[in-house]
């Protein structure tokens, strides 16, 4: 779920902060690597510590991938306060 992804990304960011300092932890982009679908991408990218998504099997369908990209774009456009740029890979 998006909440589980957020919790995992917070744990990673806290670990980075303890090892390398808060500035590095804030600057590092952490991408979600789980299942990304056109239906889930908006909620995932709305999480404050999810900086992008690694799209796997959903990229094999041009329709599905296009809908994911559009969903990511909409999420990015609605969140001007996000501290890091969002990425899709």
Image: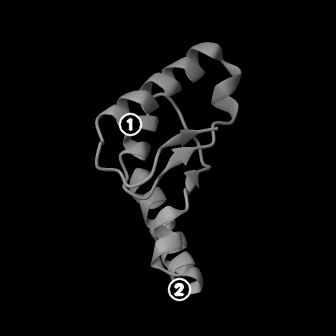
Farthest residue, direction top: 63
Please, is residue 73 above or below residue 45 in the view?
above
Q: Position of residue 1 (x, y in %)?
A: 44, 51
Is disc 2 in contact with disc 1, using a CB cutoff of under 8 Å?
Answer: no
Which of the marked residues, 2 or 1, is nearer the chain's N terminus?
2
Q: Is residue 63 above or below residue 33?
A: above
With 35 as the anchor, is 72 left or right in this view?
A: left
Q: Identify the residue at image location x=45%, y=32%.
A: 72
Side (left or right) of 22 relative to 34: left
Which quadrant holds residue 35?
Answer: top right
Task: Give x and y (percent) for residue 55.
Answer: 63, 36
Q: Position of residue 13 (x, y in %)?
A: 50, 71
Residue denoted by label 1: 76
Q: Quadrant of residue 79?
A: top left
Q: Residue at x 71, y 22 (%)?
A: 60
Can you say whether 59 is above or below 46 in the image?
above
Task: State the SS at label 1.
Answer: helix
Horizontal and vertical percent position of residue 83? 38, 55
**Residue 30, disc:** none
| Front in this rendered view, residue 44 or 39 | 44
User: Relative to residue 78, is residue 21 drawn left or right?
Assistant: right
Identity of the residue furthest to the bottom in this view: 18
Mark 2 lies on residue = 18
Label 2, residues with CA under 10 Å away: few <14, some 14-19, many ≥20: few
Question: How far apart are the two marked residues, 2 and 1, measured between alpha carbons?
Answer: 28 Å
Label 1 Cα neighbours within 10 Å, binned few <14 / some 14-19 / many ≥20: many
- Report the coloring of the rendering: one colour
Q: Quadrant of the C terminus?
A: top right
Q: Please give the name of the residue rendered at 50% of the width and 66% of the height, measured from the top-left corner.
A: 8
């Amino acid at each position: 779920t998006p909440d589980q992804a957020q919790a995992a990304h917070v744990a990673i960011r806290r670990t980075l902060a303890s090892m390398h300092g808060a500035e590095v932890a804030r600057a590092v982009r952490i991408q979600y690597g789980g299942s990304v679908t056109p239906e889930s991408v908006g909620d995932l990218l709305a999480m404050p510590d999810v900086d992008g998504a690694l799209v796997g099997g959903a990229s094999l369908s041009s329709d599905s991938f296009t809908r994911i990209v559009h969903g990511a774009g909409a999420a990015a456009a609605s969140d001007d306060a996000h501290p890091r740029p969002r990425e899709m890979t």
